[in-house]
Image (cartoon, rainbow, N blue to C red):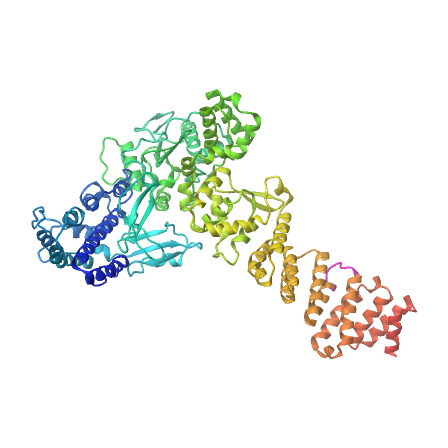
Amino acid sequence: MNNINFVFIDRFLERLHAAQSESDSSYFYDLILLGEAITKITALFLIANINDDKDRNRYRQEYALVRAGGIGDFSSAINEVLTGIPSSFLSSSLSDYEIAEMNNKIKPDSWQKISIAALIESLKIFQIQYPNITAKTPFRTWFNLFALLRNKTKGHGAPRIVQCSQACTYLSQSLVQILENLTLFKRPWAFLYRNLNGKYRVTNITDSSAFDKLKRTAGYNYEDGVYCFTDTIRKVNLLYSDPELTNFFLPNGNFRDKTFETISYIDDQKQQVDTSSYLTPVSKLPASITEGQDDLDVVSDCFSNVPKAPEEYIERKELEDELTSILLDKDRFPVVTLKGRGGIGKTSLAIKVIHSISKEKRFGIIIWFSARDVDLFPEGPKQVQSKVLTAKDISDEYCRLVHPNECIKDTFAYFSRAMSHSPFDPALFVLDNFETITNPAEVFEWLNTYIRNPNKILITSRMSRNFKADYPIEVSGMNDAQCRELINHIANKYDISHLISPQYIEDLIQESNGHPYIIKIIMGEIARTRKTSKVERVIADKDQILNALFRRTFQTLSPAAKRVFLTLCSWNSLVPIVAIEAVLWRNDNEKIDVEGAIDELQKSSFIELLEENNETFIQVPLAASLYGKTELSVYPEKIQIQDDRTLLMEFGASNPHSVKRGIAPRIESKFQKVAQRVKTAQEFQKELPSLEYIASRYPKAWLHITNFYKDYNDYEGAKRSLRELLKVTSLSTEKEKYWLEYADLCKKTNDWNGESMALLEIATIPNVPFCSISNCANRINNHFYRNPYDKQVDSKYSLFSKLASVMSKRITEGDATDYSRLAWLYLNIDDEINAKKYMEDGLSIDPCNSHCLKLQQRLS
């Protein structure tokens, strides 16, 4: 059996060849294992190509397979996907290939015929009864026959060695036909791993360039895992590997509360996989409490299926007024979004405003589409049935509501026309929980293409990274007064007012960050236990709630945003932006776009930015921070983040009160900690990129870097850092100080060119004290007195001329010694006339000045 260029199978063939050399029975049992692997891969491939639908057909199949008791369950899954209800949701790209190969009747002399015939010969050898095979039998029957062979031999039989020997030839022939001909093994397969820069590391499982675009371009969003390419890139759930393809694992039953078993057919290793993704029952879920009504009804002055107005709604006047104004505008902003964290109140706000504007005669029809899959109750989140998931679902629902007694053949085209030219009066279409829509970017593009004023679309979503509305409205936490109104309402409802003190209310508002759902959770817990507990402790114990609020949005974040977020969550402190940027730019870390990640986190409501003294600090709300800690506990780069946290802590802790002192104390703290920790020049070089990044944002830090260089006698490095500081220094007094330090460093390194340039820069600083100009002239004169040959360089003439010109304009501020220095400048450029003039002017001020007298003697 030769390689087929499918890494998983080719790796197994190495084992198979070894077994063939060992014994016929070993060879037979490994052929059975190969058949199991082929069956499981085929089932998972077909399931991966089931398109999303509101009845969750793909999830139903995966739910069953993680609980599978044997290979027969996988063969049954193949038959159900190909012939049952899921078949109507299969990717159309499989129609001419995999579906035709497995569903059509077998042609004479086809590879399917050869494969089934060989498998039947194997069954006959073991005297296993099998169903009658006719010319109309489809190839998918092979998987049932194989399950029969496997269960009657390896599973529950005791075959003799001679039978195994005879069956090997036929079973091998049967498997070879599948591996060499079944299209799914020729499709592009790869393991995708997203790097921190947003691009992907693509490890091909089959030879293909289908995934190459992911290597070159950032912006795609696929979670790490095994993928195949058919009509699009599709994740093959339940097939596990890693970026190096060191092994492959498939489901192997043993489903328990927290884990199920996977097995490697390559080396028999087993691993346990978390079951949390497969615990939701497959039976039909209840409808959401915010799902639209089943029929259109008259709501004030328009037809609508909008849900009933929410109870316990707290008025948010500014947001309500803004949304009302935009929806009533007939000429602008056809697409409006309400964006914010889960449970922040977007849906309640939308329903409240829609009930209000229905009285304004602005819209003749308002259609509510719900994609919500989780309802947030005070006792916790509950899974619900999504009403719409795809563009087709949306179109079907519209036609069902508007024409309940008609059959619209092309609902997609009909609704597309309705968005542009509504058959009723102007229409408002509301899509709630848009982030759960399948391919939200693609659906948004469709909506945005067809919608026309005066019709409007209102979208509520946890994020808007994949689309851009005409008018986005950010829904953030409630203000203080709104929080108090909500707390008092719930306290009165449950008769717990006497249990909560004014200080507890203050803490609850601050810790919840004004998040209404978190407030409801805490108040519900008080009502249940009849006592108050620390807000942080209550939220930390509500894993389901944290997952409901943050998990879906977290999974859509780029790797860079995840890395930044988890680093922030690793420490309970406000963090200056410059600090997180500097730490993540250290040498040991992969370079990432930290600024872009911070922007993404802010837009996704994971962080808030606080401005103080023109400096920006990052705050992670309590609930988001607690969720981040749970993700960090299992994050692959946890160790690196812990190292980053150590460095981050060197900036010192901050809170809303301490940030008013600005960032300077944080920078000082960082450099003090580094100075205490770093002992050698090599250690300092390792820290340098991070320190230089701090300095690029906080220029005075270049002085600290200069001092580090001096400590290790690296004066060239000290000069470089001072030059960086001088590039951005504007105050005259600071410029003079830094240029003078630079001149001193140049003198120490015998760099006269650098020293003379620095001295001239000092002299030309506007409003610099005249004594500083005079001192510069003196240093230059002394240098050329000791090094007369340097005067022969042409550029030095220009140096003397510029400095003499600057000094002569302010010489009246000087004394006799200053006049002598100016005279020496002129003498060094052979201008004896001006030299004599300023020497005589100096003597007129002080006839006994030794410097002027010495110059007089020289000139005479």
Question: Which quadrant: the C terminus?
Answer: bottom right
Q: In this view, does 654 lie to the left or right of 292?
A: right
Q: What stretch is highlighted in magenta?
A: 763-769
Q: Is residue 816 left or right of residue 33?
A: right
Q: Is residue 427 visible?
A: no
Residue found 23% across the figure and 30% down from its top: 405
Q: Is residue 168 visible?
A: yes
| Quarter occupied by residue 356 | top left
Residue found 57% across the figure and 46% down from its top: 616
Q: Is the magenta stretch mostly helix, strand or loop?
A: loop
Magenta-drawn stretch contains 540: no
User: Where residue 506 appears, x then y in whole percent?
Assistant: 56, 30
Magenta-drawn stretch contains 767: yes
The foreground one among 564 and 86 is 564
User: Where residue 532 appears, x then y in whole percent?
Assistant: 51, 27
Question: Which quadrant: the N terminus?
Answer: bottom left
- How many numbered badges does the structure rendering display? 0
Position of residue 294 relative to residue 177, above or below, is above
The foreground one among 301 and 668 is 668
| Quarter occupied by residue 848 | bottom right
Q: Is residue 296 left or right of residue 326?
A: left
Position of residue 142 relative to residue 401, above or below, is below
User: Where residue 307 appears, x then y in whole percent?
Assistant: 37, 28
Position of residue 283 relative to residue 810, above or below, is above
User: Where residue 544 appears, x then y in whole percent?
Assistant: 40, 36
In the current view of this chain or complex, which residue is farthest to the right? 847
The foreground one among 418 and 528 is 528
